[in-house]
Image (cartoon, grey):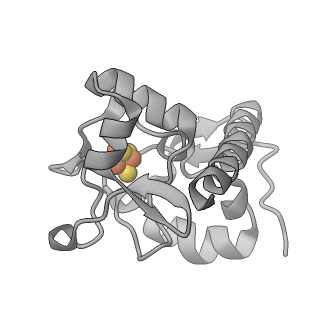
């Protein structure tokens, strides 16, 4: 497995396709950490429990945004191909496409670059910025995993 070389940066600019806001079964669920839940609850001015009750689902102990059958995998917050909760969007959405699991050449070339039209567009995202995203993604995954244990008790 070869890691993507991002020393010279990677061109990326969101093209508003909304593709990253459509799940393909459990791949693509918008998983939420306790920090994400708090940000949402504060922004919606409701308690975390209320937010979870109205907008979340739990699969295998993981909390994620609810999937509605009539939306064909589209995020509940995707409106006219735009994120309607942009200010409080979860870490997973903030760090896309620079996730640790995406940074190997097979995944990047055969999946991410094909499904995300923003890759290769716009100006280069510097390697330091990519590192920050990867660090945030790592931290986010740890928080999500830790939270899973709570929900499995
Ligand atoms: S929260 Fe916003 S950015 Fe994240 S998947 Fe939903 S619509 Fe897309």
What residue is drawn where x is 45% and y is 36%? 37
In-image side of 1 versus 52 (left or right): right
- Observer able to see residue 15: no
Rendered location of residue 116, percent (x, y)? 45, 61
Q: Nearer the viewer, residue 76 or 1?
A: 76
Q: Where the N terminus falls, by quadrant?
A: bottom right
Q: Which residue is painted at 44% across and 27% down in the image? A: 39
Q: Position of residue 110 (x, y in %)?
A: 60, 78
Q: Position of residue 79 (x, y in %)?
A: 17, 48
Q: Nearest the camera: 73 or 126?
A: 73
Left or right: residue 89 versus residue 114 is left
Q: Is residue 93 visible?
A: yes
Q: Is residue 77 above or below residue 22?
A: above
Quarter the C terminus occupies? bottom right
- Would residue 62 appear left or right of 106 to someone viewing this image? left
Foreground: 140 or 10? 140
* Residue 92: % across, % down: 53, 47
């Amino acid at each position: 497995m070869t890691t993507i070389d991002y020393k010279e940066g990677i061109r990326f600019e969101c093209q508003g396709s909304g593709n990253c806001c459509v799940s393909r079964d459990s791949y693509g669920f918008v998983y939420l950490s306790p920090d994400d839940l708090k940000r949402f609850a504060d922004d919606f001015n409701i308690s975390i429990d209320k937010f979870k009750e109205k907008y979340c689902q739990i699969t295998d102990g993981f909390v994620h945004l609810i999937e509605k059958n009539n939306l064909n995998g589209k995020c509940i917050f995707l409106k006219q191909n735009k994120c309607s909760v942009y200010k409080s969007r979860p870490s997973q959405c903030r760090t896309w496409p620079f996730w640790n699991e995406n940074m190997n050449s097979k995944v990047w070339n055969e999946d991410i670059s094909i499904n995300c039209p923003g890759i290769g567009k716009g100006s280069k995202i510097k390697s330091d910025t990519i590192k920050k995203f990867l660090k945030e993604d790592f931290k986010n995954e740890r928080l999500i995993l830790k939270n899973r244990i709570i929900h499995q008790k």
